[in-house]
Amino acid sequence: MSTLGNRLKSARKAMGISQAALAKLVGISQPYYGQIEIGEKVPSADVLQKLAAATDTSVGWLLDNIEDPASADYNTDQRVAVLNDLRAAPGLRALAEDEPMCHVLEISNAEWKGLKSIALSVQPDKDGYLLLLQTIRHIERLASVKGAGRPRKERD
């Protein structure tokens, strides 16, 4: 198995998904993905970029050309991944550095990934990321309420 295959398999298993599920995310067939994973096929640059995006890694990390600190702890502890990511926003890094607060807030890996994915013209500080986290949680609560999203009936 190639480095690419090993890295893909590792990321896929960390995500807890099958070859078929990852192939579907990328838009390729499962047999083709399986051949990539065992080293029988080499994906095009476009497919390689889609694989990196789907596994939240980088092309460099998948090909073992560079060590990607943001991906090293993939889906194990996204807080640690933020701390290791030299490209992480300073406000997000400050939040990740506050371990007691993170423990109390019980920030999930999905929430860390959501916070990392937010691109704003102005970089929020730690308090700004706390507000963003509260907003994300509020939106999720609203969406989980039965009937959320339907317009209210006007009262007479």
Image: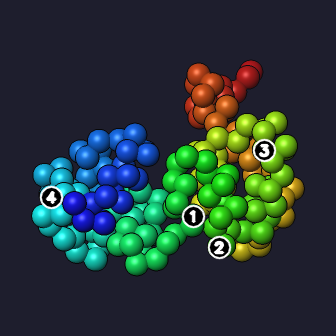
The residue singled out by tag 3 in the image is: 102
Contact (Cβ within 8 Å) of mark 2 with mark 1: yes
Of residues 111 and 7, the one nearer the viewer is 7
Task: Estimate how packed mark 3 is, as few (under 14), some (14 to 19) or many (20 or more) residues with alpha carbons within 10 Å.
Answer: some
Residue at x-position 66% and y-position 54%: 80
Coloring applied to the structure: rainbow
Q: Which quadrant is the N terminus positioned in?
A: bottom left
User: Dot 4 lies on which element?
Assistant: helix
- Numbered mark located on residue 35 in the image: 4
Residue 25 x %, y %: 32, 52
The residue singled out by tag 1 in the image is: 70
User: Dot 3 lies on which element?
Assistant: helix
Of residues 68 and 51, the one nearer the viewer is 68
First in sequence, mark 2 or 3: give its number. Answer: 2
Determine whether 48 is above or below 18 in the image.
below
Of residues 5 and 131, the one nearer the viewer is 5
Looking at the image, residue 52 sits to the left or right of residue 86; the answer is left
Residue at x-position 32% and y-position 52%: 9
Amino acid tagged 3: Cys
